[in-house]
Amino acid sequence: MKIICIGRNYADHAKELNNQVPAEPVVFLKPDSAILPKGNAFFIPDFSQNLQHELEIVIRIDRLGKHIEEKFAHRYYQEFTLGLDFTARDLQSKLKEKGLPWEKAKAFDGSAFIGPWLNKEEYDLNNLNFSLLKNGETVQKGNSKDMLFSVDRIIAEVSKYFTLKIGDLIFTGTPAGVGAVQTNDLLDLHLEGKSIAQLRVK
């Protein structure tokens, strides 16, 4: 199982980090060890002084596929959820300055929090409201209609390079509002105004 992540998929987020808005999906990977075990708190790693939350829609692939056409991409997943792509922003900045890969800042153990799986047929994935509350205050808010690349477009693009296998996860990018987390923060993931998962930072 692999975790495929899409960067800069919301124009407002690209701009808040002073990045160019991409013409095609920005792709990076996390290992399966990045998944935070269910029921565990998130511990800020000692190698970062600026550990940030990134709220994202996550889909789970349920069919084997390669070179998938966008018009058929919807057949390759049935479930989705919300997740957090934790990022050591200070470490990422240092790596980017040197032209080096981001993995140490993005793919460390526990850097991928995943909420409960939901049936996509019960929601409109092209117009999905989601938000993150930190200690009761809304810090991130997005709608899937603002994605630069839709879920189906992402699947089509990614499958040109990687064979998608059953159980693979795709983090689809974060809207603006990313920010640092601190010890004892409570992160509350909301979908269409309802809390679906909470996570305590240690």
Image (cartoon, rainbow, N blue to C red):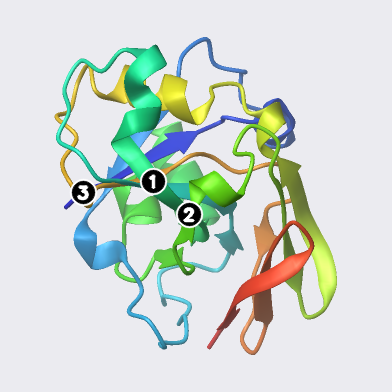
Pick whichever of labels 3 and 2 is earlier in the sequence. 3
Q: Is residue 51 in view from this perspective? A: yes
* Quarter holding residue 185: bottom right
Viewed as shown, does residue 89 lie left or right of 62? right
Count of numbered marks? 3
Secondary structure at badge 2 equals strand
Q: How far apart are marks 2 and 1 (CA)?
A: 6 Å
What residue would you read off at disc 1?
A: 78
Residue at the extreme right: 137
Task: Tell me the element at label 1.
Answer: strand
Which residue lies at the image location 51% right of the left edge and 47% below the top edge? 120
Residue at x 41% of width, y 88% of height? 39
Residue 1 image offset from top left, x and y in percent = 16, 52
For the residue carrying disc 2, how many other residues have a C-alpha within 10 Å: few (<14), some (14-19), or many (20+)? few
Circle 2/circle 1 CB separation < 8 Å:
yes
What amino acid is found at the position of numbered circle 1 in the picture? Gln
Chain-order first, disc 2 or disc 1: 1
Give the side of residue 158 with respect to residue 121, left or right: left
Q: Which amino acid does label 2 sit on?
A: Asn
Disc 1 versus disc 3: nearer the observer: 1
Percent position (x, y) of residue 137?
85, 71
Q: Answer yes or no: do the residues labelled 3 and 2 have beta carbons within 8 Å?
A: no
Label 2 sits on residue:
119
Three-letter residue code for mark 3: Lys
Of 177 and 148, nearer the camera is 148
Instruction: Name the foreground residue: 197 vs 29.
Output: 197
